């Protein structure tokens, strides 16, 4: 067709059932969609230091889920992000323990602020 591009977009190749909409406030410089915080949960590294959070979901595989549960990070548990700025692992408080959690694993933990998680 005249005036159309032959370039493929993500919408053309995305597997069925994958939501391809992107946040309109995306990082235009990089072309990557922004992840927004909302009541249904956001990745743990997006939380503010000192913020009390409730775990609302885990997006990990079977082995990683088991590892998180062994560390006391379960859906419904309360955690606090003690240190998370910069690069490297996050320091979180779970019950009376402090744990270091790598960023890759931390992105698999969906959280919501305590005030919003109960709604």
Image (cartoon, rainbow, N blue to C red):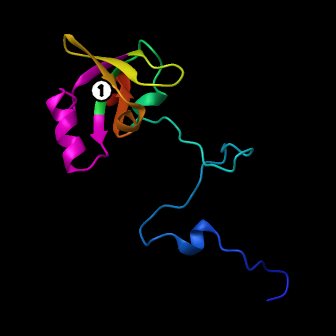
Bounds of the magenta segment? 56-81
**Which quadrant, please, contains the N terminus?**
bottom right
Q: What is the crowding at mark 1: few (fewer than 14 residues within 10 Å), some, or many (at least 20)?
A: many
> Residue at left 20%, top 46%?
63
User: Is residue 67 located in the magenta-colored stretch of the structure?
Assistant: yes
Judge from the rendering whether residue 15 lies leftward or rightward of residue 24; answer left or right: left
On the image, numbered disc 1 is attached to which residue?
54
Quarter holding residue 54:
top left
Q: Position of residue 34 (x, y in %)?
A: 59, 43
Q: In the image, is residue 83 above or below residue 56? A: above
Which percent across, then down, holds residue 114? 33, 22
Q: How many numbered discs, if any?
A: 1
Q: Which residue corresponds to the image point at 29% horizontal and 31% vertical from the top-left?
A: 55
User: Residue 100 is drawn in which quadrant?
Assistant: top left
**Residue 91 in sight:** yes
Q: Which quadrant of the rendered structure holds the C terminus?
A: top left
Residue ranking furthest to the right: 3
Instruction: Report helix, strand or loop for mark 1.
Output: strand
* Figure check: 111 above or below 96: below
Vertical placement of 63 versus 45: above or below? below
Q: Is residue 116 magenta?
A: no
Q: Is residue 50 left or right of residue 20?
A: left
Looking at the image, can residue 114 be seen?
no
Q: Residue at x 32, y 46 (%)?
A: 59
Residue 40 percent across, percent down from the top left: 38, 39
Q: Nearer the viewer, residue 118 or 77?
A: 77
> Where residue 25 appears, x then y in whole percent?
67, 42
In-image side of 109 versus 97 (left or right): right
The answer to whether residue 7 is above or below residue 2 is: above
Give the quadrant of residue 8.
bottom right
């Amino acid at each position: 067709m005249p005036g159309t591009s032959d370039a493929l977009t993500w919408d053309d190749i995305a597997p069925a059932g994958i939501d391809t909409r992107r946040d309109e406030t995306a990082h235009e410089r990089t072309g990557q969609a922004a992840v927004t915080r909302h009541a249904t949960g956001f990745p743990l590294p997006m939380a503010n230091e000192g913020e009390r959070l409730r775990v609302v979901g885990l997006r990990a595989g079977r082995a990683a889920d088991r590892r998180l549960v062994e560390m006391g990070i379960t859906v419904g548990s309360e955690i606090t992000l003690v240190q998370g700025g910069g690069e490297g692992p996050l320091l979180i408080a779970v019950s009376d323990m402090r744990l270091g959690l790598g960023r890759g694993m931390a992105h698999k933990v969906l959280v919501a602020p305590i005030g919003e998680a109960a709604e």
